[in-house]
């Protein structure tokens, strides 16, 4: 039996963009229905509850400048707390093995770090010219979008160790490797996040703070006010529009309204059947905006015992598949949690293997950095995003060379009654929860203008 | 009402790959059903009949080495004939205007041509190392796939005019611009087509011959033998498989079998709903393999009057949107047909405007090269491939930087009961009709092995 309803605005996706858009429209008296494929809200943010503790298996961080998600968190009464800051960090490299250090890097690495910092400054300098509302209008856009970040690294960094450092940083920021990422996209993304330095920084940077109870709690509380306007387990298959209305349907539902807001990532938006079909530029965009690859792994221990050893729990390594680790324990400190990322090509590769094999490889990494005590966690929890049918990767879309100049202008341009949101469409903090919230706010303005 | 059927092999797509696979399987006594979204066979090959003449609005050419489509043409009794060879060619450039010439280029351009030839030789030399069955295993694959053809041009050609010439050649071969194309993909594609020289050549090259009556005639005749095993106007929406069988369904049909062969381009294959969902690598592949952009325009005149002026009808121009033109008249010479290509970014841009505006811009190009007589054709026929819902571009998929090394190995690897064909999966003449036929033959071997 087909569940049918008529409303004013249909929102596709109950992540932060969709929830924000629906809430703001509701507040203004607009009728909405939110269609969500999953049986939960939050999208790429997902807080799981296990045996008395919570784990953010998806997006989690916020930091200075990310005022829109912070405001929403405040409104929902969810407190934030700093990412665990104390102790010495670990660095692992193929040649030099494991080294402990305070500050940004081991003292021996001063020269490499100098070169890396210089490179990042040059990168951020180059990014200044990108107009965030229209990256395709950057001076020399075709040249910048016609090369990859890898090419830029090869041309601009003259030390192999500094190049390696930059590659690791790119992987951590984009969940993609430098050869997959358009230079123009890299510049756009860095500028949108207040600079590459900000994106790789914890204290005072994009990884500064977390939400107590998990970022998913913010989504759940925000969604509560929408009540049964959110339809879970309703994957959208087709969107049909004409001069009078728009109908969004799935296997067992059909909702008709005036406007539809699609908040899912471009590549997933491209899989919906549209009638009439999407215009060529929009279609090209969705066929060349793949998702980054990330698997987020938590190893959970009774206590954060590494703190007693004077360690912060943070690791940067040039040997994978886990190259970046944080202490991701809750604010009260127990249980202790080490959280590592498998990114880019490693994520795509390991996303498809058995969980048992992935677990073994991941724990081997934890042991490599923290010793045998890491081998036997009391729990092991993973967010395997490339395998998630309704995300197919993360953190967000990563534009390869050519996308921005060939079809970037189709990213936010409405198509008839369809408007676009989602973190990929943000101008600030693209790829972050904050960008998703901002995109939801932006699209509300578009929709209200049309509804008037 | 849902039309239901049980068969052994379900083929998705009745282009040359699908027709070839279905015919070869049928010949061996295997039951097949071919599901085609359009109301015709041929896919990206489409011969239209108008007022007593025929026009190939899609793929049309064959040439030396393309033995598989030639064999099929022979089997169907369709004769081929040479692309019109006689007369002087035209070259148009921003700086120098219109020039007539015999040979490959105007005499003044000897130095530029020398540099261009040298560049193409270097390109073909570099391509020698690409293993066609596994481009991701090319020595230094990550570096080659981590840069665009544009970067290679900038680094390897030291004259602006020769660079411009290479850009025009790349656009003509890929229906895409150098900044959109991975260098590794460019090398793979060139090698698969017997070298870049072959791909840009008419006499003795990839544009050598055409089919009398149109390439679509070959598809139609080949399809005839399959009778009602071909279901037209049946766009596939979902493919569901388990241990025992596979079911392919659309709005009003469902076919169950042992094996499914999907022959549509990767980006369109990615829009089908699969249950279970595609593995991560395959999903990534379909989200980063956009179609090239091409609009193929015929201006039709009572006679090929340019021949009387000593012109071949061929043009190469560095001013768009039509930069390449051929005399595309039928072998008997009447009516006279000039055929021009709008490629890459121009195609994406002009695909979305009104036909009237596109026609005006196109005829302005014909007039720029051939004078006022070109302004009033008796007929104007276009193949607007980016706007075609069941192709969304052409000639074929163009891999941006990063695709081959990140997920190229998923291109031909079967997923459970699903096998992949289509010109994109060929090892020789990828992107050509010949590649499509070859891919159909290859997949038959895979399927027979499984069915045994």
Image: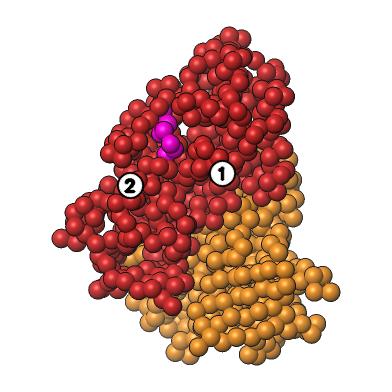
Chain colours: A orange, B red
Disc sitting over residue A87 in the figure: none
- When the figure is inspected, residue A226 is found, relative to residue B200, above or below; the finding is below
Query: Which residue has dot 2 on it?
Result: B222
- x and y, in percent, of residue A208 in the image: 64, 69
Residue at 59%, 55% in the rendered image = A283
Residue under circle 1?
B383
Q: Residues within 10 Å of mark 1 (few under 14, many from 20)?
A: many
Quarter in which the C terminus of chain B is drawn: bottom left
- Mark 2 crowdedness (10 Å alpha carbons): few <14, some 14-19, many ≥20: many
Label 1 or label 2, whichever lies nearer to me, is 2
User: Quadrant of the rendered structure where residue B160 is?
Assistant: top right
Q: Are marks 1 and 2 on the same chain?
A: yes
Q: Position of residue A305 (x, y in %)?
A: 44, 77
Chain containing the residue with disc 1: B
Specify start and end residues of the magenta stretch as a single range.
Answer: B209-215
Residue sticking out furthest to the left: B452
- Label 1, secondary structure: give it: strand
Label 1, label 2: how far apart the Cα atoms are: 23 Å
Q: Residue at x 71, y 44 (%)?
A: B356
Q: Position of residue A201 (x, y in %)?
A: 62, 61
Front-most of residues A209 and B191: B191
| Rendered residue at 30%/73% (across/down) | B242
Q: Return the residue found at the far front.
A: B52
Tell me where residue A422 appears, x and y as whole percent. Answer: 64, 67
């Amino acid at each position: 039996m087909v569940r049918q309803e008529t409303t004013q605005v249909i929102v596709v996706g109950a992540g932060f963009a969709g929830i924000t858009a629906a809430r703001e429209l509701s507040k203004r008296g607009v009728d909405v229905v939110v269609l969500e494929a999953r049986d939960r809200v939050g999208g790429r943010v997902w807080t799981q509850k296990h045996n008395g503790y919570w784990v953010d298996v998806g997006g989690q961080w916020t930091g200075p400048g990310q005022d829109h998600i912070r405001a929403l968190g405040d409104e929902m009464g969810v407190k934030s707390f700093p990412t665990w800051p104390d102790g010495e960090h670990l660095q692992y490299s193929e040649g030099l093995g494991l080294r402990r250090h305070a500050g940004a890097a081991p003292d021996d690495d001063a020269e490499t770090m100098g070169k890396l910092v210089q490179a990042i400054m040059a990168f951020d300098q180059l990014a200044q010219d990108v107009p965030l509302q229209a990256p395709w209008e950057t001076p020399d856009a075709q040249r910048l979008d016609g090369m990859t970040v890898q090419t830029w690294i090869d041309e601009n960094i003259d030390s192999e160790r500094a190049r390696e450092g930059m590659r690791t940083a790119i992987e951590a920021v984009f969940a993609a490797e430098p050869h997959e990422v358009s230079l123009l996209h890299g510049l756009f993304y860095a500028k949108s996040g207040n600079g590459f330095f900000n994106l790789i920084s914890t204290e005072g940077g994009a990884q500064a703070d977390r939400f107590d109870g998990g970022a998913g709690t913010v989504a759940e509380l925000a969604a509560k006010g929408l009540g049964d306007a959110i339809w879970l387990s309703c994957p959208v298959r087709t969107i049909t529009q004409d001069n009078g209305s728009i109908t969004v349907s799935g296997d067992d539902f059909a909702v008709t309204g005036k406007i539809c807001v699609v908040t899912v990532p471009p590549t997933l938006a491209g899989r919906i059947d549209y009638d009439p079909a999407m215009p060529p530029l929009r279609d090209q965009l969705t066929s060349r905006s793949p998702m980054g690859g990330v698997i987020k792994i938590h190893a959970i221990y009774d206590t954060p015992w590494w703190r007693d050893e004077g360690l912060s729990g943070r690791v940067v390594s040039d040997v994978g598949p886990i190259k970046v680790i944080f202490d991701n324990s809750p604010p009260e400190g127990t249980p202790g949690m080490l959280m590592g990322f498998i990114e880019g090509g490693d994520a795509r590769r390991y996303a498809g293997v058995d969980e048992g094999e992935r677990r073994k490889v991941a724990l081997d990494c934890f042991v490599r950095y923290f010793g045998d005590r890491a081998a036997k966690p009391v729990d092991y929890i993973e967010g395997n995003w490339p395998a998630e049918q309704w995300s197919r990767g993360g953190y967000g879309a990563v534009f390869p060379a050519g996308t921005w100049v060939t079809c970037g202008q189709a990213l936010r341009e409405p198509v008839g009654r369809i408007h676009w949101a989602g973190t990929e469409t943000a101008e600030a903090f693209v790829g972050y929860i904050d960008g998703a919230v901002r995109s939801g706010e932006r699209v509300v303005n578009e929709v209200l203008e049309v509804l008037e």
